[in-house]
Amino acid sequence: MRHFLSLKDYEKSELLEILSAAAEMKRDLKADKAKPKLKGKSLAMIFEKSSTRTRVSFEIGAGQLGMRPIFLSSRDIQLGRGEPMKDTARVIGRMVDMVMIRTYAHERLEEFAAYSSAPVINGLSDDFHPAQLMADYMTMQELGYDDRAVVAWIGDGNNMANSWMMLASKMGFELRVATPKGYEIAPKWAELAKNFADKSGAKLYFYNDPIEAVKGAGVVATDVWISMGQESEREKRLKDFAGFSVTSELLSLADRKAILLHCLPAHRGEEITDETFESCAESIFLEAENRLHAQKGIMVWLDAAK
Ligand code: CP
Ligand code: NVA
């Protein structure tokens, strides 16, 4: 049995299998030929943080696969009243076929997975958002990018930045990460990604200047400056991230045909201007749509790996 907690645990060939299953299911769905590949199975979705895309994509995706999804907010289940993660895992793992969890510390997810008899999918933790990155790479593939891409990450060294590092270092593309000083990628993840990059041929570069990172890039990616759980740091972060907004001026330094990816939700006037966001809406909302197809790819792959 495999879990899907971070791209660091996956080989490139496995990620490509998931992506190819996702692309096939997207084609089938568009042709009105979707097959309920996981008919009669169930998916528990535990949310300790808010969500729009992750909830809808997993819940609707599971339904399209013939599964029964069940939405569990930590506000409503005993987990939110202090029932240990490992007890919740042993109960839910015995009752359902698959579990998706959105939580804070990545260790909570690992603890759940260690005690769960059903495969566990990371629906975002403080460290990683791998389900999102599958949709991001799927979007890149659809728009003509592959492992020769040059991607610039502009913003926080957060869960999305960590996940981009894992994706780049596994797939073998070039990733340039630009963060303000003090908001760099955690050294343990940067080191791990460098080890993977030695094997895959990925190039990883780190800057404190968005202009350096964006020059000639084919894909520009960004995310909020204040992630869920960091609300009390808002004032300080807004000051520290000055100059890291993706403006049309910054984007004009990227490749002429560059696409922009944003996992959403976006905070216009902070990490991105309204003008840039709206001019790149096509790639951003294709990325959001691909959550549905990519999450189905993950569920079908995990079920087959059992
Ligand atoms: N991108 C993403 O995970 O969105 P939600 O927080 O709405 O699920
Ligand atoms: N970095 C953001 C991503 C939201 C999908 C957060 O963790 O809030």
Image: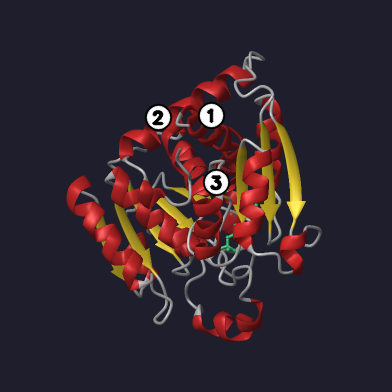
Q: Which residue is mark 3?
A: 121
* Kind of residue at badge 1: Val
Q: Amino acid at mark 2?
A: Glu
Point out the frontmost of discs 1 and 2. 1
- Judge whether 70 appears above or below 241 on screen: above
197 lies left or right of 136: left
Helix, strand or loop at mark 1: helix
Out of 27 and 302, give the one closest to the viewer. 302
Mark drawn on residue 17: 2
Q: Is residue 29 above or below residue 11?
A: above
State the residue in front, 91 or 109: 91
Find numbered disc 2 in the image and state the secondary structure of the residue it sits on: helix
**CB of mark 1 within 8 Å of CB of mark 2?**
no
Is residue 128 shown left or right of residue 188?
right
> Can I make out residue 201 in this image?
yes
* Quadrant housing residue 161: bottom left
Tell whether 53 sits left or right of 173: right
Dot 3: what SS?
Answer: strand
Q: Going 47% across and 36% down the picture, which residue do you hit? A: 138
Where residue 125 appears, as percent x and y from the top left, is: 55, 60
Q: CA distance from mark 1 to mark 3?
A: 12 Å
Three-letter residue code for mark 3:
Ile
Residue closer to the observer: 265 or 277:
265
Q: Quadrant of ligand 2?
A: bottom right
Give percent across and percent down for residue 200: 22, 46
Graded by Cα atoms within 10 Å as few (under 14), some (14 to 19) or many (20 or more), the crowding at tag 1 reads some
Instruction: Give percent across and percent down for residue 43.
Output: 67, 38
Q: Residue at x 68, y 43 (%)?
A: 44
Residue appearing at x 56%, y 53% in the figure: 263
Whole-number angstrom distance, CA of label 2 to CA of label 3: 16 Å
Distance in Å between CA atoms under marks 1 and 2: 10 Å
Q: Are marks 1 and 3 in contact (CB under 8 Å)?
A: no
